[in-house]
Image: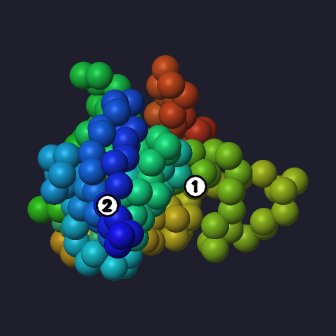
Amino acid sequence: MAPSTSSAITLNINGEKYPLSVDHRTTLLDALRERLDLTGTKKGCDQGQCGACTVLVDGRRAVSCLQLAVAAEGREITTIEGVAEGERLHPVQQAFLDLDGYQCGYCTPGQICSAVAMIEEHAAGWPSAATDDVRPEAGPPSLTADEIRERMSGNLCRCGAYASIVQAVARAASAPARSDGRTGVAHTEETVA
Ligand code: FES
Ligand code: FES
């Protein structure tokens, strides 16, 4: 008997369970968009280069075009549809709105998901390639424009809305923490020149 090329899996997305049968070659991105109608996650390059398909997997950002749906079973997946807290926008979403962090908006869901995790990575003290002093005792670096650009460098914007995106990320990073603890590191827009 030929080996099966599909499996019945259950994906945990935005706190809900989604049972589905998928071909083993189906990417998480295609499962979200084509099978589950979660079309907020965008397909740009489909080869891990643009960041448009960024989602959170167990709280870490991941390009969903490079992850197989079957490998995502048992993980906590958050898409742009699950970033808000009920009717209340996530501080990153609000900052993108307030500061026009987009033009056409195609890259925006990926930018926002990436920024949500990036702010948490920074608050946890993770250094970036732009960090001068990476010694643990140095603590988290200031969230300067250079730090934000480096940490968001996996998310491309063909409209070139980068200046506003950097401002929006800086504002969201200085916003008060939400009830689930997301965001809320002590940096201000003044650090962004
Ligand atoms: S569509 Fe996944 S990185 Fe471009
Ligand atoms: S807003 Fe158009 S690609 Fe970024």
Image coords of residue 9 (percent x, y)? 37, 47
**Residue drawn at the location 63% of the way across and 45% of the way down:** 123
Q: Nearest the camera: 117 or 104?
A: 117
Q: Is residue 29 visible?
A: no
**Is residue 38 found left or right of 183 in the rendered image?**
left
Q: Nearest the camera: 37 or 82?
A: 37
Q: Tag 1: residue type?
A: Leu
**Is residue 117 found left or right of 46 in the rendered image?**
right
Image coords of residue 167 (percent x, y)? 38, 54
Could you say which quadrant of the image residue 18 lies in? top left
Q: Tag 2: residue type?
A: Ser
Q: Nearest the camera: 24 or 112?
A: 24
Pointers 1 and 2 in contact (C-beta within 8 Å): no
Residue under label 2: 6
CA distance separating discs 1 and 2:
45 Å
- Quadrant of the image for the N terminus? bottom left
Residue at the right extreme?
A: 137
Residue under label 1: 143
Asked whether mark 2 and ligand 1 are closer than 8 Å, the reply comes as no
Q: Nearest the camera: 65 or 185?
A: 65
